[in-house]
Amino acid sequence: MGTLDAQPPHAMSRYTTVTEGAIEKCQQDLRAGRDMGRSIPGLDATEATLIAIESLAANALLHAPPELILVRPFGPLDDWSLAVLAEILFAFADQMKGKTGILEQQRPEVLERAWAALEQAIDSPTKSPMLWYEDIFFDVAQECRIKGDRRAIELLKRALAHNIRHNEGNNVDSLLPDLAETYLWLGELDQGLEILTALLHNDPANIWTYNLMAITFDRFGLVDVGLEATRRGLDVLEATGDPEDLRDQLLRSLDDLRESENRGREADVDSSVLADFRAALALELGAGLHRPLIPLCQELIPDLDRMPVKLPPQTPDLPSRTQRERHAGTGRKRSQSKARGRKGKKRR
């Protein structure tokens, strides 16, 4: 993008799919009345126009009064503004950490409002071209999971459905293990182990599956099978090498599992599920089925096609020339988070 990187910063979010330079270019083209279909390679006119309009609206939040940020109902904010609002609220909560008195008492409310803003964003009917929703689904699911809320499972299923519909399933390989871990976290051991068994059958050489089991099974009381999985993971590294530099982590996990007193949950697992899981651990590395992950995902999650999925971006109403000129003079200050590229990152 060259010279665009020198432009003034815009309101941003950790969930962004676009750079500040791309935002600035779309805003410039909108103000000038140019063909928005030519703003950014790879973006159509609808997406570029939405980036301009939504970012202009979100920039106003950087100068909003505290009452609007902390108290007022969200109203009809678009998804990008909700993500930016959540970012501001998370920053407030970070500043309140360790404080005493009323600030300490109000911090949980600020965090709850941030999570509520993100939930409203993922529940809206249409997607914004500015957001990587899979990460929002994941983070909100994590928060639910910590609270023991089973909505975490549905949120991750929705993340998978969204990723398959809108991003060609490019994060199914990380979201499926996340779903398995969430089942285990919430005590649904059979379901979690069934997904991991299917992943092992599909690719017995995938070290990330063993890594997940090594670092989490202690928490779930699955120490015996955790030891088996960790040892198998180390065998995989011996056979395939260690390009991800995971050996030390697996060795530490092996020590932690040996010393753990949180044992015995294998007794709560259906005997056939446990037998299938152990058989999958023993597979030869070359015995993987290597099925495409999307059909595998659909098979493992029978209700996946019933998950609500956002509609594609819709052509927006264009602001008037007066509004564009007013936005053009709006000052900005840097937000706390950095933009990511358009392509979604893998969570590893």
Image (tube, helix red, strand yellow):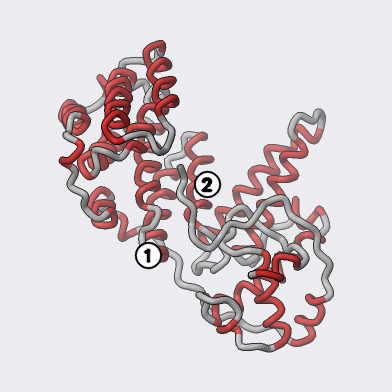
Q: Residue at x 68, y 37 (%)?
A: 108
Q: Which residue is mark 1?
A: 165
Q: Is residue 191 above or below residue 39?
A: above
Left or right: where 309 falls relative to 72: left
Which numbered disc covers residue 140?
2
Expressed as whole percent of the image width and height from the top left, the position of residue 183 reads 36, 37
Amino acid identity at mark 2: Val
Expressed as whole percent of the image width and height from the top left, the position of residue 7 reads 75, 68
Q: Residue at x 22, y 52 (%)?
A: 299
Q: Looking at the image, which is closer to me, 247 or 283?
A: 247
- Neighbour class for label 1 at 10 Å: few (<14), some, many (≥20)? some
Task: Between label 1 and label 2, give the one nearer the viewer.
Answer: 1
Q: Residue at x 71, y 48 (%)?
A: 89
- The secondary structure type at the circle numbered 1 is helix
Expressed as whole percent of the image width and height from the top left, the position of residue 315 reads 54, 81
Q: Is residue 127 above or below residue 207?
A: below
Cα distance between the residues tagged 1 and 2: 20 Å
Q: Is residue 33 above or below residue 226?
A: below
- The secondary structure type at the circle numbered 2 is helix
